[in-house]
Image: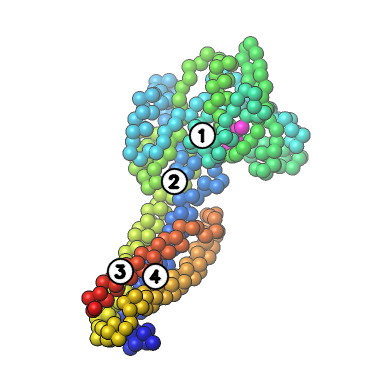
Amino acid sequence: MLVHLLFNNQNKTQLIIASIAALLGFTFLLTSVHYFEQVRTFGKSSEILGSNSLIIQKKVSNFSSMALSKNDFSAAELENMKGLEFTENVEPILNNNFDVSLQTNSELVPYFRSDVFVQSISADFIDLPLENWTWQPNDDFVPIILPREFLVMLNTFASAKGIPQVSDELAKSIGFKFTLSNAEKKEWYDAKIIGFTSEVSSILVPHAFLEYGNKNFPIGKPEKISQVLVSVKEGNFGTFESWMEERNLESKKSAMVLGKAKSIASALFSIVISVSVLVIFLAGLTLLQYSQLIIYKNSYELTTLLHIGYSPKTLLNTFSNYFLRISLVVTFASALLFVLFKFWIDEILHQSGIQIALSFTFWNFAAVVLVVVIYYLVNMRSTKLALQKLR
């Protein structure tokens, strides 16, 4: 009866306009937050290296080819990189200063042996549990991260021998063996693949293994830092790229293209998120104004209801529940629109060769629930104050 008395005879034009605006705002917010999170984590599941991590080195010029300039990084240069506002973490990539070869040690594949170049990076840059990236001389095996180019070469070798090629998962079950040597001695250690990367062209090993080889099998060459692994802060890739160009630095082209695409997409979705929040804010203000207008127009009826025994809490709940139902209807409708938009956008992305996760993210729905709760609390507070003035 109270709903009929207070709301049914009101002009609902303002309510309808505000609800449509909220519907569009919620739908854009769901869509933009979802794809902002998808873009931020794009490629992370297929790469061992952490998000926004790039390997940089100095460009090779004619002068460096003739040994007239240096292509390694000094300690001062590394400290300068760590102090830049757009770098989150900077770590030199350590190189082997000893002779090492890798051979297959499994019945799953034919015997294969090659001298290799191994490097080591900090566990902070690797998307693996820390306990998986450690080694001691008495361990069962050395964990290694293999460049995908190496797996391609291994499959090419297998194809030439007329045997089945190996997948990523099968490769992880293949046994390998490292041979560490110098002019005086040799040692052998079992190795096992724990992941792959397209960003590094060398075999990655834990720090402890590299330090052990450099200490026990030195070949007398001075150790140099020719590559640096840099983690760039979110939204700062353009600044980082300009900084690289100014200092004649380079990185792998595919990593740069991916980083630039993610940076542009993140910026665009950030703008859409901001616009969506603004639309929702204005729609919320309109709904609050509509609520206050109803109270003003029904001031006589509300005063009478209070005098004949209706409690302020009953009237407050009537107003709050009415607008809560409107908010829930708008939220449900925006969720349906978002699902339709998602299937359409996902299909376009997949046709373009961009493979992203098809699952829904938690943050988009959490954002809408947060907005609804905030609006409900604010509306309840403003309605309570308005009703108190009528007593």
The answer to whether one can see residue 337 in this image is no
- Residue at coordinates 39% horizontally, 43% vertically from top-left? 233
| Amino acid type indicated by mark 1 | Ala
Provide the residue designation for mark 2: 259
Do the residues bearing badges 4 and 2 touch, measured as CB atoms within 8 Å?
no
Vertical placement of 7 versus 242: above or below?
A: below
| Amino acid type indicated by mark 4 | Leu
Provide the residue designation for mark 4: 24
Provide the residue designation for mark 1: 123
Q: Disc 2 versus disc 3: distance between alpha carbons?
A: 46 Å
> Residue 71: x, y in percent?
42, 26
| Amino acid type indicated by mark 3 | Arg
Vertical placement of 284 versus 82: above or below?
A: below
Principal SS element in the magenta part?
strand
- Choose the circle earlier in sequence order: 4 or 2: 4
Q: Nearer the viewer, mark 1 or mark 4?
A: 1
Do the residues bearing badges 4 and 3 touch, measured as CB atoms within 8 Å?
no
The stretch of residues the image draws in magenta is 143-147
- Report the front residue among 274 and 242: 274
302 drawn magenta: no
Q: Disc 1 versus disc 2: distance between alpha carbons?
A: 21 Å
Q: Disc 1 versus disc 4: distance between alpha carbons?
A: 44 Å
